Image: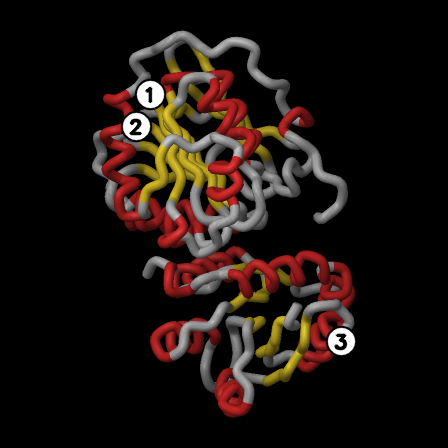
Amino acid sequence: MTPIKVMIVDDSAVVRQVLSTVLAAQPGIDVIGVAADPLFALEKMQRQWPDVLVLDVEMPRMDGITFLRKLMVERPTPVVICSTLTEAGAQTTLQALAEGAVGIVSKPRLGLKQFLYDCVDELVQAIQSAARANLRRLVPQAAGRLSADAILPAASLAMARTTETLVAIGTSTGGTQALEAILTRLPLVCPGLVIVQHMPERFTAAFAERLNRLCRIEVLEARNGDRVMPGRALIAPGGRHMLLMRSGAQYQVEIRDGPPVSRHRPSVDVLFRSAARAAGGNALGIIMTGMGDDGARGLKEMRDAGARTLAQDEDTCVVFGMPKEAFKLGAVERMLPLGEIPAAILAGMTGRR
């Protein structure tokens, strides 16, 4: 396997030194250079172009967002943002995702050096995922795996029909842009949505706030007991699982702690299983761009419970991992381009089985 060529761009000498040391020790990764700011980086990149950039946001001479925007216009290159996690910084990092970054690794202000040593597995996974991303398709914890059984037992019976319907969506790498493309095209009169986007803790609130400003529908980071209702999208908070629950003929969400499932918390498998149990044929399940197989088994459970199921097609996915695995399991009724999913959400509920 050809090593992934990585360049680190960060104004901190400590970050450059530690990251280059720990990444160079990883099999399959070749650190080809470091730079203190984007202008120095561009000089080095002209001599040897990296497969993946690990990029800070706040830097002298040119900030990371401006550099990212320039790259995506002139020569699209996979970028992993490695930035300080603060309330203000979360918005900046979300802006980076909107501009085309395909991964986030958040770093603290205190204990930075030790953190960089400790987070090497997370960073390597982000780099590997970024290296597989197809930017032409982009729209403008590794321990033993647990299944959704760790959070919620499988359904025994599908729920009876109700007049209230909903949509459950799961996505990962490339999903922030894909979700924006879908949610901004939905009218106020649309089914309620419950969404898992793989994203670190504290980023989901800022992500939901940003989408809420852009969309006609209401977009919120989910809180325990929030009702799922037409014209509203609830996004699972980072670091916690979100389950769909039924109360009479209505639906609400439960936010629950627990171990990572399919290596993720929140997990798409957990959301989809809960949708199979609580909603059955009243639901539409959609699995979208992302690396790995989180959500594949849960989507199959939704389909078996009578739900309609869709997957984003390969041509419009940044990473065709999650939809591919769901398709292989027989969980997917139809593959659709990203641009056709909003119409399918509006039409899908009228064609329930």
Mark earlier in primary sequence (2, 3)? 3
The numbered dot on residue 188 is: none
Q: Secondary structure at mark 3?
A: helix
Which residue is depicted at the point 78% across and 72% down?
25
Residue 281 is situated, as x and y percent measured from the top left of the image, at 39, 17
The numbered dot on residue 191 is: 2
Q: Is residue 218 visible?
A: yes
Q: What's the residue type where badge 3 is placed?
A: Thr
Q: CA distance from mark 1 to mark 2?
A: 6 Å
Which residue is depicted at the point 51% across and 37% down?
328
Is 301 situated left or right of 186 in this image?
A: right
Q: Residues within 10 Å of mark 3 (few under 14, many from 20)?
A: few
Q: CA distance from mark 2 to mark 3?
A: 49 Å
Q: What's the residue type where badge 2 is placed?
A: Pro
* Residue linked to disc 3: 21
Q: What scheme was used to colour the molecule?
A: secondary structure
